[in-house]
Image (spheres, grey):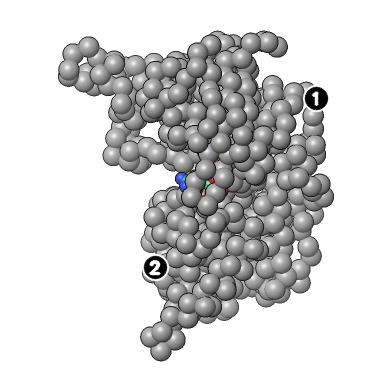
Amino acid sequence: MNEEYLLEMKGITKIFPGVRALDDVDFKVRPGTVHALLGENGAGKSTLMKVLIGLYKANSGSIKFNGEDVNFQSVNDSIKAGISMIHQELSPVPYMTVTENIFLGKEMCYSRSPFVKDNEMEKETDKLMKQLEINIDPTKKMKDLTTAYTQMVEIAKAISYNSKLVIMDEPTSAITDKEVEHLFKIIKWLKEKGVAIIYISHKMDEIFKIADEITVLRDGKSINTVLASKTDKNKLITMMVGREMKQLFPKEEAQIGDVVLEIKNFCGDKFDNINISVRKGEILGLAGLMGAGRTEVMESVFGITPCDSGEVILNNKNIDIKSPEDAVKHKIGFLTEDRKLSGLFLPLSVEDNMIMANIDDYINAGLINQKKIVYDCNEMVDLLRIKTPGLEQIVKNLSGGNQQKVLIARWLLINADVLILDEPTRGIDVGAKAEIHKLMSRLAKQGKAIIMISSELPEVLGMSDRIIVMHEGKVTGELSREEATQEEIMRLAAGIAS
Ligand SMILES: Nc1ncnc2c1ncn2[C@@H]1O[C@H](COP(=O)(O)OP(=O)(O)OP(=O)(O)O)[C@@H](O)[C@H]1O
Ligand SMILES: [Mg+2]
C-alpha cells in the first residue's frame, strides 16, 4: 500500500453548543484506497467530513491535502482543491432536471459564454451517466426520481468533479443490493484511477467488501485505524460501542393472537390487488426490491395517498382512513421511509417532534401537561439512547441516526396498536439497531401488531414471524419464519414464482 498520504487531518476538535462533537481527532487517508469511517450514531463521522470540506470551522487542528496545508473556507474551495462529498442527507432541488442538478454551481465553469448551454450540458450528463452505466434520462425532473435514482444522481454528481478524494456518507442507505453492486463497480473504477474514497456506512458487510483501511470513531475521538484484512466484524463492533455485543437480532417469541389489521383488495397507482393481514403480537416482514410498491401500499393504508379501491379492516370493523390524522385516531402509527421529507420537522425541537402525533393526549381542559411531556420524552431519550444535549435541541442538529430515533419515539408515544415501520433501522448504528430490534420484540410481546418494511434481508429474516414479498406492485409470495431463506425471498422479490 502507498506509504504517502493524500489527506492528513491532525488534532481536529469541533465544539457545538453543549456538544464536543470531535475531540482531538487524527485521520489519514492514502491515495487510491477506500478508507471506511465507522462509529455509532453521533460519533462524529459526518462532522469530521464537514470540517474537512470547509462546511464547518474546527475549533482547532490542522489539515494537509495533496501535500499542502489547507484550510478551506467554503465547500467551493474544497471542490476546487479536488474533494467532493456525497452527503448523508440528499439535497436535490426537486424542480431541476437531472442535468441541472449535476451542473448546479458549475454552469459557468463549463460554458465559456455567459449563456448556459443546455444542450451541451445534457450531452455531458448523458455521457457521464453512460460512463457510469446509470440508466437515466438527463431531462427528467429530480422530484420524479425514486430515492434510489436520486442517490445515483448524487453519486454521479460527486464523481463529475473529477476529484482526487470522494467522500461518501452512507451512500447505500437508500439503494438496493443491485445498485450497491453498481456503486462498488464505480468505486473500483475510481480506485484504479488513483482516487481515494472515504466511505461511511453502518453496514459491516459492505465495509469488508470494499475497504482497505478502517478508522473507528467513538464519542468524537479516534479509537483506532486498522487494515480491513487484519480485523473482523466483532472486533470493529467492540471498538465502536466500547463493549461486546452478543446478538444482532434479539427476536423474542411473542404470543400471536387474532388478526388486528386487514388490507383487502387494495389497488392503486403503483400496486394491484394487495391482501395483507397482521395479527396481535406478530411482526410481519414486507420484503421486496426498491420500487416494489411496499411503501406506496402502506402510504395508502395510512391515508397519505388515496387508493383506487380496497378495504381496511381494523379489529373486524371496516374503517375509512382519509388522512394520517384518521389513521392516528385508529391507533395506527407509521414510521416513514423518507424521514427528512415526510417525517421530521427539522427546525423544531426534539420534544416537539416527539409529541407531534399525540399532542392531544397532553391537553386536559385546555391546559398542557408540560411535566408529562418532559417525562415521556426523557423516557424515550433513555429508551432509544438518543444522543442529544436536551429536549430543546433542534432536530436539524442531531446526527442522522439520532434523527431516526426521534421519529421512532413519536410513533411509540401514540401508543399504537398497529405500527407500520418503513426501513426502521436505515442509517442506524449496530448498537442502536439491536436496541430497536429489542424494542420491536418487546412491543410485539405487549400485543402490538407490527408491519416492517425492510430491504435488509438479515433484518427481515431475523425479526419477522411471517414474510410477505412484493414485486412490481403485486404480492408474489408469503413465507413463514421457518421456511424463509435469503434465496427464497430474493427469488420472489425478482418476480420468479416457485
Ligand atoms: N450543527 C450542529 N449543531 C449542534 N450539534 C451538532 C451539529 N451537527 C452535529 N452535531 C452533534 O455532533 C455529534 C456528532 O454528529 P455527527 O453528525 O457527526 O455524527 P455521525 O457520526 O455522522 O452519526 P450518524 O451515524 O448518526 O450519521 C452529535 O452529537 C450531533 O448531535
Ligand atoms: Mg452522519
Mark 1 Cβ and ligand 1 under 8 Å apart? no
Whether residue 493 is visible, yes or no, is: no
Q: Secondary structure at mark 1?
A: helix
Look at label 1 and name its amino acid: Lys
Counting from the top left corner in percent of width and height, residue 154 is at: 44, 31
Q: Which residue was labeled with disc 1?
A: 230
Counting from the top left corner in percent of width and height, residue 290 is at: 53, 42
Of labels 1 and 2, earlier in sequence is: 1
| Mark identifier at residue 323 | 2
| Left or right placement of residue 285 versus residue 295 in this view | right
User: Residue at 70% across / 73% down in the picture?
Assistant: 446
The quarter holding residue 442 reads: bottom right
| Mark identifier at residue 133 | none
| Left or right placement of residue 275 versus residue 163 in this view | right
User: Residue at 46% across / 41% down in the picture?
Assistant: 89
Asked if residue 64 is positioned above or below residue 234 in the image, the reply reads above
Counting from the top left corner in percent of width and height, residue 335 is at: 53, 59
The reply to whether the C-beta atoms of the residues labelled 1 and 2 are less than 8 Å apart is no
Quarter that holds the C terminus: top right
Give 440 or 265, whichever is nearer the viewer. 440
Toward the front, the furthest residue is: 60
Give 134 or 197, whichever is nearer the viewer. 197
Asked if residue 157 is positioned above or below residue 113 in the image, the reply reads below
Mark 2 Cβ and ligand 1 under 8 Å apart? no
Question: Local crowd at mark 2 within 10 Å, few (<14), some, or many (≥20)?
Answer: some
Q: CA distance from mark 1 to mark 2?
A: 53 Å
User: Residue at 36% across / 20% down in the picture?
Assistant: 125
Look at label 2 and name its amino acid: Ser
Asked if residue 289 is positioned above or below residue 307 in the image, the reply reads above
Counting from the top left corner in percent of width and height, residue 16 is at: 49, 46
User: Residue at 57% across / 45% down in the picture?
Assistant: 20
Q: Secondary structure at mark 2?
A: loop
